[in-house]
Image: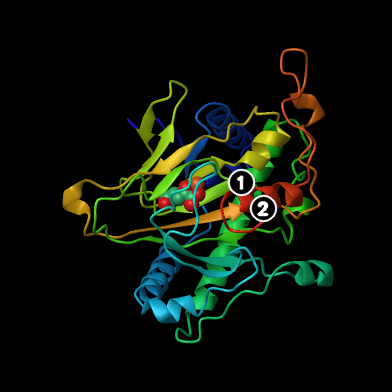
Amino acid sequence: MSSIPSVNLQEFLSDDKTQKEKFIKEIGSAFENIGFVALSGHFLSDELVADLYEEIKIFFNQPQELKDSYEIEGIGGQRGYTSFGKEHAKGKKEGDLKEFWHFGQYVENDPKLEAEYPDNVIVKEQPKFNAVGKETFKMLEKTAKYVLRALALHLNLEETYFDDYIKNGNSILRPIHYPPIKDEPKNAVRAAAHGDINLITLLMGAHGKGLQVKNHNGEWVDAIARPDQLMINVGDMLSRLTNNKLKSTIHQVVNPPKELWGTSRYSIPFFMHPVSEMPLNCLENCVDENNPKQFDDITAGEFLHERLIELGLIKK
Ligand SMILES: O=C(O)CCC(=O)C(=O)O
Ligand SMILES: [Fe+2]
C-alpha cells in the first residue's frame, strides 16, 4: 500500500454533508502528517492532459538554440524557458538535471497586477502550445481553489478565506523535462531534496517512479499516483501560515536505475501562489502555549523573492 493517502474531490463538491466532511477530515489529516495526498475527481480531462504532454514534448525536443531564444533575461525565470542545470535546490550548488517552461497567471480585470507580473511567452512554432497551457492552468487553478476551501474549513476559517488571495494570484504552471542521463552525474539528481515555496502544489505526472517524499522517520518513500490522480502537497507558504500545523514535506526526484538512463521524465507541477500582498503571518488559532509561533511575519511577495535568490534564479 502506498503511504500517500487518496481522496476524491467530488466528495467535497457533493451536496451530501457527510461526504464533504469526510473529504475535509481526510485531506486535513493527510496534510498534518505526510503533507501529500493523491487526488482524483479534479477538473482536468484526459484529452487536455494528453494535448499538453504532446505540446511540451515537441517543445523540449526542439534544437537548443530555439529553446534558448525563449529564455528571457531579468525575470528570474518566471515565464518562458529555463535551461538545463540552471535551478538548484536551496543550499545546494549542483544544478538539478532538468529544463522547464513557465506559464504564469492570466490576469483578469486588474491593471496593477497585470503590470506587476511578467507577460506569458508565446511559442510561435506551435500554434496550440499556449492555448493548451492556458486551459490547463485554469483547470488546475479551479481544482486548487476547492482544495483550499476544504483546508480553510479544516483550519476553522471561513470557507472562502483564501479566495481573494488566490484570485489573480502569482501561480505558475511548470512543465518539466528531465532528459536522458548520459554520464554518471556528479552529486546531481533530477530534483534535489526541497520543500515547495508556494501554498499548495498540484502535480501531474507522478504515476512513474522517481518522486520520493521524506516521512517522519526520515525515510524516503515513493510517491506514486494513479494516472487519474494529481499528487498534491503543502508548500512552505501554507506551512508558515499555519505555524507548521500543515506540513511542507521535503521531497526529491531521484535518478532512475542505469538501465533506464536512456529515458526522459516529464512532470507538470502547478504551484498555487497567492497575490504578493498576502500576509503569511501565523494564524492566531494555530499558535498557543504548546505550539509557540515558529516563523517571523512576512508577505508572500517578500518570501518568494528571498527564495528565488536562494534557488539561483535571481541575482542579489
Ligand atoms: O517532477 C516531479 O515529480 C516533482 C517536481 C517537483 O517537486 C518540483 O518541481 O517542485
Ligand atoms: Fe517540489
Determine which quarter of the picture holds residue 183.
Answer: bottom left
Camera-side residue of 43 and 98: 98
Alpha-carbon neighbours of circle 1 within 10 Å: few (<14), some, or many (≥20)? Answer: many
Residue 118 image label: none
Q: Is residue 121 above or below residue 141?
A: below
Residue 14 in sight from this viewpoint: no
Question: If the image is split into quadrants, where does the C terminus sit?
Answer: bottom right
- Look at 72% across and 13% down and name the residue there: 290
Question: If the image is split into quadrants, where does the N terminus sit?
Answer: top left
Residue 188 in the image: x percent, y percent? 37, 48
Camera-side residue of 29 and 42: 29
Determine the residue located farthest toward the left in the rendered image: 259
Residue 33 in sight from this viewpoint: yes
Badge 2 element: loop
Give the residue pinned by disc 1.
197
Residue 95 in the image: x percent, y percent? 44, 53
Q: Is residue 259 above or below residue 104?
A: above
Residue 273 image label: 2
Determine which quarter of the picture holds residue 212.
Answer: top left
Kind of residue at disc 1: Ile
- Look at 65% across and 35% down and name the residue there: 239
Badge 1 element: loop
Label 1 with label 2: CB-CB less than 8 Å = yes
